[in-house]
Image (spheres, rainbow, N blue to C red):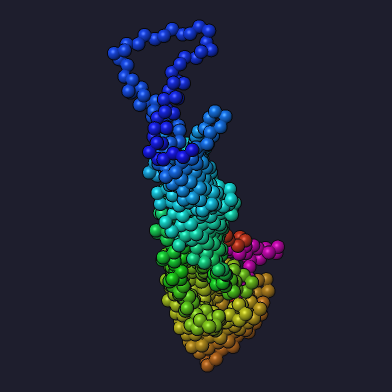
Amino acid sequence: MIYTSRYIKFLFTILTMLVLQVLIPLNSSSQIPPPKPKVNPQNVNLEELEEEAQDTLEKDLVIIDHADIAIGITGEGRQLFKEVRQVEMRQGETYMYCDSAFLYDNNNVRAWGNVIIQQGDSVNIFSDSLFYNGFEKKADFYSEVVLESKQQKLFTDRLNYDLNTKIASYYEGATLTNDTTHLTSKIGYYYVGDNMAFFKDSVVVVDPQFELKSDTLKFDTKEKIAYFLGPTLISQNEGKIYCEDGFYDTKNKVAEFKENAQYQKGEEKAWADLMTYDGNKKETTLTGNARFIDGPKQAKADVIRYEEGKEITNLEGNAFYKDEKQEIRSERIRYDKKNEVYSTKGRSRMSDPPQILEADRIDFDGNIGFAVGDVIWRDTAQNVSISHCDSVTYLKTEDFLKAMGGRPLMTTLMDDDTLFLAADTLISFKQNPDDSVRTLLAYPDVRLFKSDLQAVCDSLVYSEMDSIFKFYDDPIIWSDTSQFSADTIHIQLVEKKVNRIYLYRNSFMINSPDEVYFNQIKGKNNIVFFEDNEVRRMKVDGNAESIYFALDDDEKYIGSNKTVASSMLLYFGNNQIDNIKFYTQPKAKFTPMSKAAGSDEKLDGFNWDTSRRPMTLEDLFFEKNKSKVEIKTPLPPNDKTKLENKPEDKSGTKPKSDLKTTKQ
């Protein structure tokens, strides 16, 4: 039976009236009907009741608003289905369009050809065919399915959509587009009302800024935020990021990567408990067990921050950096890759073999370095160190180092013993950076301490070229019971052992085992020759004078011998004078002990000065009768840092002088 479209509204009106007739009667199965409510006919609006019933009916039933052709088939006393062509249908606020459709069971629809469902003004779904359950308001779309929601589009060949919950789902693959972002997966759930989508199995996101592959992903279609719910790999600008949790805000260019987070780009690799990225600032932050590798370069810290635009890396907390040239440890390290500048804060250690620098703060631009706060510098190749200073300036190309502030202390090995040298300023440099020859300058108030040698002066120069210590401005050297002084003193080393001591202008040597009687040798210039750490010869040139006290066989003083000559040559054995040669009309005078007293027994210029002599390592840092400073560097054994008086031997005799005169 064929109906034209103008009769469709009439048929639905008849159907509506039949439904109302069914709803009006009371339940006939009740044995005792309930009492009828009293109705005031004047208060009943039959038209309003009819409109409410009509509205309720239209929300639940699929209504055909238009069809070019409609075919109805009846059977078993009821209408089985209708076939309609060029259809416009609706159910509540949902509108459906198609080329042809079957309506059966009064409310179910099968549609073909250019199928469209519109739900409000937010959702449009297109497909080639459709099955719609009007009772449950659920739709199954087939072939070339497109779901549109605002700026999002979902493409698939099969889609399930619940119009009640506004949830779309697919299980055979789909693609979601959002502006320039495209997402594909095998399984997905799209919560249209919440602007949220869940994707699983072979998830791929393609964006102009990145490409993402994941096992499970949640995507906020409104805010354009991707949440990683499983193993995820992101590729961007030849770099790759792997994680198993986190998110990527594509709109604000902010990302967070957690759970086994890793990064790789060429030779660059990074790991951390948490990685964050701010695309606006172009800043990447690695937090918790952060590590970074770039070829030979390695970095570790609690937190690593990288500023991409400036190429600046900040390492914070237990910071460590290493490259092919150096190694740095500190609480905080800042590295400027463009300018190759390092700076540290907190206790820092920079190793540039063979040199090591420690300080509370270090700034280094690849050539010029500046260290501040309890600075320690070491040259492991030369076995030399400088400590106890407030600041150090370092020039790498010239291998120049200047230590000042506090009381800089140089420590080195000499003659299998530790030599300590302190001054207000220490400078170390190489005249030729290509070789290992180093020069040391120290000034002012220079003090030197060694277990068998001590010295003071105002300034000092030491060159590894000739292995000579040069003492200037009122220098004094002490060795055991002897004291050497002159305007200038040189100590020459051979294989790090004292070989000669040169005393220039106003040379004066004093020896006294008891500080009662003093053996003295004076001259213009003086050269002391050493062999096996003992004095073998002493040559005095120009206005040579000497006073020495002779002993008898019982080691008792018998008198003083005063000699004047143009020059002298003294020979020693076992630190005792074996022989003396006088040149150019020598004059000698012997005075018995009974008369050997007074100023005649001291040469002009005599100055036995023990007040300036460093007796312990602490004496290098403070003046006597003043409070001592704290020594932080571990000290050698006591026998190396403190001079003690020699005990008397078992015979009870006094210690012998190093310059004992020959018996007369």
Say whether residue 419 is magenta: no
Q: Which residues are magenta?
A: 639-658
Question: Residue 359 in the image: x percent, y percent?
Answer: 48, 62
Q: How many marks?
A: 0
Question: Residue 374 in the image: x percent, y percent?
Answer: 47, 61
Along the horizontal axis of the image, is 657 left or right of 208? right
Please state which of residues 195 and 648 is positioned toward the viewer in this rendering. 195
> With respect to residue 386, does 146 lie above or below?
above
Answer whether residue 336 is visible to the viewer in this image. Answer: yes
Q: Which residue is depicted at the point 36% across and 22% down?
A: 49
Q: Quadrant of residue 514?
A: bottom right
Along the horizontal axis of the image, is 365 left or right of 593? left
> With respect to residue 268, does 83 lie above or below?
above
Answer whether residue 420 is visible to the viewer in this image. Answer: no
Q: Which residue is depicted at the point 63% across and 68% down?
A: 655
Q: Which residue is depicted at the point 35% across and 26% down?
A: 51
Say whether residue 656 is magenta: yes
Please state which of residues 126 and 265 is positioned toward the viewer in this rendering. 126
Most distant residue in the front direction: 1
Q: Which residue is depicted at the point 41% across and 65% down?
A: 309
Question: Residue 58 in the image: x percent, y percent?
Answer: 41, 32
Most distant residue in the right direction: 650
Q: Main secondary structure of the magenta part?
A: loop
Q: Quadrant of residue 89?
A: top left
> With respect to residue 269, does 56 lie above or below?
above
Please state which of residues 483 and 380 is positioned toward the viewer in this rendering. 380
Question: Residue 402 in the image: x percent, y percent?
Answer: 44, 71
Quadrant housing the C terminus: bottom right
